[in-house]
Amino acid sequence: MVSLKLQKQLAASVLKCGRGKPTKIHSRSRACRMKGAKKKGCHSRYGTAGPRRLTSTCIMKVKGNVFKNKCVLMESIHKSKAEKAREKTPSDQFEAKRAKNKASRERKFARREERLPQGPGEKAPAPAAP
């Protein structure tokens, strides 16, 4: 078989067509940044956000060959997220209850302050009708 490489080159130079695109040259800083990201394990899926501490610890464990396969990794992630949610829920409920009690206590004191200046046996004067 005859190689047509030279003929293709000549035809491309005469017709000014068929030239390949020039390869993209990345800057050295970007290459270094990508290398560092790859080393950490976050080079793929650029821009996806996850819980930072959980993600980084899982990545290091994956690199350290802790998880047998992806299924085990996903299971551990779900377990840790559920545990964090369980810890968070009671504290939120406690804070809501505390705020509600504080508001009711303030309302109670406000009502008491309204009644005290009048005296125990006296009734409040009816507001004048316009």
Image: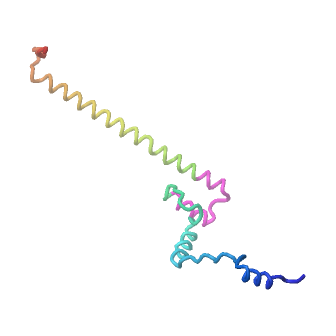
- 44 shown above or below 15: above
Give x and y (percent) for residue 20.
69, 76
Give x and y (percent) for residue 72.
64, 54
Task: Give the prevailing secondary structure in the magenta stretch.
Answer: helix
Q: In the image, which residues are magenta? A: 54-76
- Indicate yes or no whether the magenta region holds residue 58: yes
Give x and y (percent) for residue 128.
11, 15
Residue that lies at the very extreme toward the front in this rendered image = 15
Left or right: 89, with 107 as reference point: right
Left or right: 7, with 103 as reference point: right
Residue 115: image quadrant is top left
- 14 shown above or below 30: below
Residue 5: image quadrant is bottom right
Give x and y (percent) for residue 51.
50, 55
Comparing 117 with 20, the one in front is: 20
- Indicate yes or no whether the magenta region holds residue 72: yes
